């Protein structure tokens, strides 16, 4: 199965870097049927990034009011992102909107998984918080397992 | 008995960053209009202090995910002006080509995904994809072609890594650029069709008497550079005198600084300004596209900016094709830039308007001071004035419709609110 992992975020905005950091941790496991990409811009680009993939795993920081460091895994191919998570991406025309756009156009990979990592701070120039750093490690491990599991 | 209505939008969707607006109507008359910004203040100017001058393009590119090239270009130009270096010939042509990629990408995103839903009576690009998937597919392809130009010239699509003060790390091969031609030819046709589609929309009535300001790029439509700023009311000054003519003020309800022209007031930057000041410099095909739909030489209804943005889309495709046809690989990818203790100024035309950078360096090339004036902070006062005029004329509309129309009026400017917020030493009062 052709897969891609897409980390979404901004390096200079504190915990908003979480998705990018997960992607960087996974770069080493890239192979013929797996690519790992970073998305620092607007997420409509996701539609091109996962083009041709049967499985897409997207990681983004969330700002939804739950405890910082909370990890959520959503099977986005099964239905819209749950309320409380949709629209809470820190990016405009966010990941949720890009997923829905792709669904409407029939361009959503058959298996689309969204990992959300709740951030503590998104201030420009602030460092990654410890709790989110730990969550980054856990999500990277979880995705590695998910990719290694038999179909 | 007086009756007060308040129309408020907490979060303004479909503008980059987070913003909101407040409109107060008392006895059918507008008493207050505020565009509010909730984004945390930008720390970039402080963040740049102490950094090497060569780092500014990469750092400032991260201010905005939609227009990183604009930030890279304005900062490079500032550093080069300070060192007395002029990047020209094919090195500059490549910059213009990269910038055309950003215009195509950004204008397409705004016209189709952000602004068109307002005119077509759908709530978002997602709903538009459900009702008119062909239109959205076309927009996505057009946007991707802009991204492809950025990837080939800039090394990657977002935050291009190939840009440096003095030029490039590596100049692309002619064949790499030529491979973009078939797609750009398709994009050119799709852009012309975009102009027709945009011109056929219904536009709310609004006429504003504004002062348009844009760069003057000496005989070409301003995109990647400009030494002077000019206005439709006769202003004409070198960009180094920016702060002699522009005042930035903190206003209570916004983290962004509002810019105004000294002793003149608000002004308007962006596609409508460029078009009003430099219409005759558009590529022949862009001009023909404007003529075909009877676009007036000066567009004073800000809702019609979507047509002007589409005309600029034609221009960007056409210009990219011209630059590729004339491209010859340069002998060296960059020029030497020696820093010195001085002030440097740079400005370029971001898709949404003039982006001005000013830096002061020491002899070792360390940044002592940085100022960044994004287009949205220059337009903010004008946006509020539009809202005031529009709501005054349409105060009888029901709240929901008024709210939608106000949002649409804000999106006329393609505002990038996260870029417009500024680091402030003042305490910010929030309501």
Image (spheres, coloured by chain):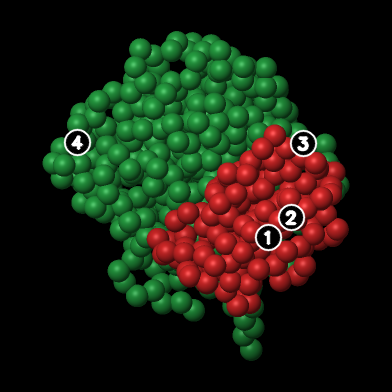
Give the foreground label among 3 and 2: 2
For label 3, the SS is loop
In the foreground, B64 or B103: B64
Q: Quadrant of the N terminus of chain B?
A: bottom right
For label 1, the SS is helix
Report, in whole angstroms, how far the alpha carbon at label 3 lies from the one at label 4.
Answer: 47 Å
Question: Disc 4 marks which residue?
Answer: B339
Which residue lies at the image location 62% right of the left edge and 17% below the top edge? B179
Colour displayed for chain B in the image of the structure: green
Where residue A2 sits: x, y (%)?
76, 40
Q: Could you confirm whether marks 3 and 4 are on the same chain?
A: no
Report, in whole angstroms, how far the alpha carbon at label 3 lies from the one at label 2.
Answer: 19 Å
- From the rendered image, report the letter of the chain displayed in red: A
Give the foreground label among 1 and 4: 1
Direction from residue B257 to residue B103 in the image, left or right: right
Q: Is residue A56 visible?
A: yes
Report, in whole angstroms, how far the alpha carbon at label 1 lies from the one at label 4.
Answer: 48 Å
- Mark sitting on residue A142: 1
Question: Disc 2 marks which residue?
Answer: A146
Q: Residue B289, relative to residue B34: is it above or below? A: above
- The local crowd at label 3, few if under 14, some if 14 to 19, many if 20 or more residues have their Cα within 10 Å, is some
- Indicate which disc, 3 or 2, sits on the residue closer to the N terminus: 3
Q: How many marks?
A: 4
Circles 1 and 4: CB atoms closer than 8 Å = no
In the foreground, B379 or A122: A122
Circles 1 and 2: CB atoms closer than 8 Å = yes
Circles 3 and 2: CB atoms closer than 8 Å = no
In the foreground, A94 or A8: A8
Where residue B161 sits: x, y (%)?
45, 36
- The local crowd at label 4, few if under 14, some if 14 to 19, many if 20 or more residues have their Cα within 10 Å, is many
The subunit letter for the residue under badge 4 reads: B
């Amino acid at each position: 199965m052709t897969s891609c992992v897409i980390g979404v975020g901004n390096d200079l905005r504190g915990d908003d870097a979480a998705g990018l950091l997960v992607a960087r941790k996974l770069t080493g496991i890239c192979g013929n049927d797996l690519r790992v990409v970073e998305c620092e811009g607007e997420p409509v680009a996701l539609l091109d990034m996962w083009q041709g993939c049967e499985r897409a795993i997207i990681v983004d920081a969330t700002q939804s009011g739950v405890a910082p460091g909370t990890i959520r895994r959503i099977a986005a191919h099964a239905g819209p992102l749950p309320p409380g998570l949709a629209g809470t991406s820190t990016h405009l025309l966010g990941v949720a909107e890009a997923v829905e756009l792709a669904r409407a156009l029939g361009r959503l990979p058959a298996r689309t998984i969204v990992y959300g990592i709740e951030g503590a701070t998104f201030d420009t120039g602030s460092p990654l918080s410890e709790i989110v750093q730990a969550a980054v490690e856990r999500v990277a491990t979880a995705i590695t397992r998910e990719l290694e599991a038999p179909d | 008995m007086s009756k007060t209505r308040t129309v408020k939008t907490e979060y303004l969707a479909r503008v980059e960053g987070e913003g909101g607006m407040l409109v107060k109507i008392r006895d059918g008359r507008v008493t207050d209009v505020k565009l509010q910004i909730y984004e945390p203040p930008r720390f970039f100017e402080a963040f740049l202090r102490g950094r090497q001058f060569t780092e500014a393009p990469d750092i400032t590119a991260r201010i905005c995910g939609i227009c990183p090239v604009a930030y890279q270009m304005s900062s490079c130009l500032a550093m080069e002006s300070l060192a007395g270096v002029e990047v020209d010939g094919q090195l500059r042509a490549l910059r213009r080509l990269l910038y055309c990629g950003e215009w195509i990408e950004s204008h397409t995103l705004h016209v189709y995904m952000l602004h068109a839903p307002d005119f077509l009576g759908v709530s978002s690009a997602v709903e538009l994809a459900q009702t008119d998937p062909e239109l959205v597919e076309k927009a996505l392809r057009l946007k991707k072609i802009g991204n492809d130009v950025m990837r080939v010239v800039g090394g990657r699509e977002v935050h291009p890594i190939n840009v440096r003060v003095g030029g490039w790390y590596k100049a692309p091969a002619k064949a790499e650029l030529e491979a973009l031609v078939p797609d750009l030819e398709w994009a050119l046709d799709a852009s012309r069709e975009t102009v027709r589609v945009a011109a056929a929309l219904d536009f709310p009535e609004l006429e504003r008497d504004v002062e348009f300001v844009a760069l003057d790029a000496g005989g070409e439509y301003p995109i990647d550079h400009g030494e002077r700023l000019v206005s439709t009311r006769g202003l004409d000054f070198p960009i180094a005198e920016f702060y002699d003519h522009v005042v930035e003020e903190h206003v209570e309800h916004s983290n962004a600084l509002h810019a105004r022209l000294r002793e003149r007031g608000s002004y308007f930057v962006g596609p409508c300004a460029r078009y009003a000041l430099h219409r005759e410099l558009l590529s022949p095909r862009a001009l023909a596209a404007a003529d075909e739909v009877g676009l007036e030489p000066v567009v004073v209804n800000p809702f019609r900016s979507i047509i002007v943005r589409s005309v600029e889309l034609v221009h960007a495709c056409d210009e990219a094709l011209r630059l590729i046809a004339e491209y010859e690989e340069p002998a060296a990818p960059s020029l030497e830039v020696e820093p010195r203790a001085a002030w440097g100024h740079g400005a370029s035309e971001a898709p949404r308007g003039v982006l001005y950078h000013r830096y002061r360096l020491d002899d070792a090339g360390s940044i002592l001071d940085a100022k960044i004036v994004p287009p949205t902070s220059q337009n903010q006062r004008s946006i509020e004035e539009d809202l005031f005029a529009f709501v005054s004329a349409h105060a009888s509309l029901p709240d929901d419709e008024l709210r939608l129309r106000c949002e649409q009026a804000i999106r006329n400017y393609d505002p990038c609110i996260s870029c417009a917020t500024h680091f402030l030493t003042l305490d910010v009062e929030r309501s």
